[in-house]
Amino acid sequence: MSAEVNAPVKQAAPKEALFSKKNRKALFDPLDDNNPISVQVLGICSALAVTVQVKPAIIMALGVMLVTAFSNLIVASIRDRIPGRIRIIVQLVVVATLVTLVDQVLKAYMYDVSKKLSVFVGLIITNCIVMGRLEAYAMSQKPWPSFLDGIGNGLGYGAILVFVSMIREIFGSGTLLGFKVVPQFLYDMGYVNNGLMMLPPAALFIIGCFIWWQRSRNPKLINVS
Amino acid sequence: MHSNNYTFAFAAILTVIAAVLLAFASEGLRPQQEANIALEKRSDILRAVHAKPINPNEVVTYYTKNVAELVVNAKGETLSGLKAFDLVLKDEYEKPENARQLPLYVYTGKDGKKYYVVPLHGVGLWGPIWGYVSVKDDFKTIYGAVFDHKGETPGLGAEISTEIFQKPFEGKTIIDDKNNFVSVRVVKKGQKVEAGPTHMVDAISGGTITSNGVDAMLLKCLKPYLPYFEKLKPNAKP
């Protein structure tokens, strides 16, 4: 035993730090340089639908983050054992199981929010972010970086959702998280809530403006296409 | 490349794990989910009679204190020994008319007046729609209406669950001057109900099938209660 322990280990790779440069990149890149919505242009559909108010947007973002993180983790841990010919099906089963769990938990403990999100929780299964990250990242990376990549993409998605929903709720309903923020005297002076903000196209305009702003500011995104 | 046997075994094991996990989650969370649905039903009934406070913790106590549950049949007789709240409306309406046991909720307001809440069940475009309509003690004027749905199109059919659609029902009448049942019809612009505008409510543009569903639901579900209402009228013949 002792001989083995003392023997110089030549071939073992140096243990990677939990938050090495590469792992930090996996976690933080999706927030800006590689944002799933504004750069990868994935998951637009739900971003239009659930951003009328901030609270459902936050819950949806948390749901997506949990699903991307844990499906990445699970798929990355069994990636060498997944038969190549059915890998998409396997990924889908993992994702669908997780989404159904999230849906059931929401129905049990956050019934009103789950009603507001209606079909969109179930549609996380078909959210391109989840499958996209599984194919592009988790199938070829170790579990921990994959988990971080999932968290990062969930956060990047959530950041856009919360940003868009804040604008829509303030200008569409005059509230923020249900609290009144537009003072009454403005209404008395003739200010009215913007009805367009309540409708899905508003989200498209806001996301469009965000992409414009992001590209003008971030040199990495100019002419990448 | 993995062998065929390996692929099949892998798929089988994965399926079993996923199935067991979901079965446990579904069974474990069911009591909580059913409690949520029952709570929603109670708050819907209370909303149909504009009853507040709707503090989520007080709904059950408030409901039990102010709402009486009845079961009536097609002849207008009350049936005892049945729990109205647990009756499944969909199943009752599949039975022949005479065998139906229909729940009715009677709310007593602060002023002592009684409001009769009729539960509704029908079909929309994509799935079931339901609701509660409260009738004043003249047995023809609608006091409040609440509608909900399983999965109608957001922005179109789903608008039946919003106040914009529900509010106009208030004050409309279901019985005309000649004492005939007309219900409240959900109509498009240009359509007319012979009995007059107090029997008309605007349909939703783009949600025609759901609107028609609400229309049919009101026709179907209000009528069976009329014999019972008839008996409650002060000048009713015994």
Image (cartoon, coloured by chain):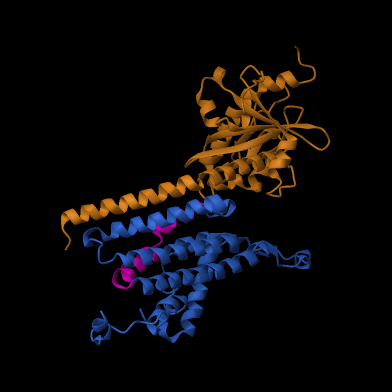
Chain colours: A blue, B orange
In-front residue for pair A185/A160: A160
Looking at the magenta stretch, what is its main secondary structure? helix
Q: Is residue A121 left or right of residue A178?
A: left
Q: Quadrant of the N terminus of chain B?
A: bottom left
Q: Which residues are magenta?
A: A118-142
Spot occupied by residue B32 in the image (x, y as percentages of width and height): 55, 46
Left or right, B35 with respect to A21, comes to: right
Tell which of B92 and B157 is nearer to you.
B92
Residue in the image at 51% along x and 61% along y: A60
Query: Which is nearer the eye, B177 or A172?
Result: A172
Q: Is residue A135 magenta?
A: yes
Q: Is residue B186 above or below residue A19?
A: above
Counting from the top left corner in percent of width and height, residue A150 is at 41, 69
Q: In the picture shown, does residue A208 fall above or below B202?
A: below
Q: Does residue B185 appear in this view?
A: yes
Which is nearer the eye, B126 or B63?
Answer: B63
| Residue B158, position as x, y percentages in the image | 55, 47
Location of residue B62 with respect to A51 vertically, above or below: above
Judge whether residue A37 can be spotted in this image.
no
- Report the residue at 52% width, 74% height from top: A209
Taking the spot 34% from the left edge, 82% from the top edge, the residue there is A15
Could you tell me residue A193's position as x and y percent? 67, 63
